[in-house]
Image (cartoon, grey):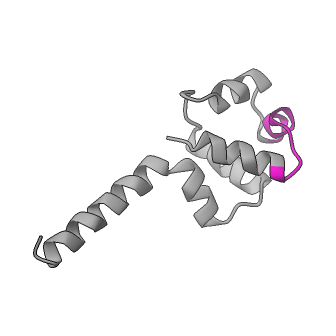
Amino acid sequence: MTNVDKLKGVIKEKRLTPEKLAITIGIDKSTMYRKLSNGGEDFTIKQADLIASALSLSADEAQSIFLVSLSHKCNKRLELKQEECNGH
């Protein structure tokens, strides 16, 4: 799952438009808008990598945008393990 709001913010921060980013990564602008709509389809790994490069994202920034559900699951597991260790 993609953090669309965060991605849109970074695009704006970098003074780009979704159209320019679409051209840069080689997809149609309508595809980009569909993927940027809330509840839209996720980006492929290749597209996410190209976007991360085009926007000069760090690995942490890219993960926080493109691996939202994975990060959330890992954090939940860590919380559960901490509770087990604390005797809860």
Q: Nearer the viewer, residue 67 or 88?
A: 88
Q: Nearer the viewer, residue 83 or 29?
A: 83
Considering every residue shown, the one lying at the far bottom of the view is 86
Q: Nearer the viewer, residue 19 or 37?
A: 37
Question: Which residue sits at x=79%, y=26%?
Answer: 29
On the rendered image, what quadrant is the C terminus found in? bottom left
**Residue 76 found in image quarter:** bottom left
Q: Measured along the vertical axis of the image, is residue 21 above or below residue 15?
A: above
Q: Main secondary structure of the magenta part?
A: helix
Q: Residue 42, percent across and down?
A: 55, 35
Question: As drawn, is 2 to the left or to the right of 73?
Answer: right
Residue 65 in the magenta stretch? The answer is no
Q: Measured along the vertical axis of the image, is residue 23 above or below residue 65?
A: above
Q: Residue 69, percent across and down?
A: 43, 47
Considering every residue shown, the one lying at the far front of the view is 88
Considering every residue shown, the one lying at the far left of the view is 87
Question: Which residue sits at x=64%, y=42%?
Answer: 5
Report the magenta residues as a range. 13-24
Q: Residue 33, percent across and down?
A: 72, 26
Question: Which residue sits at x=69%, y=54%?
Answer: 52
Q: Residue 22, percent across and down?
A: 79, 35
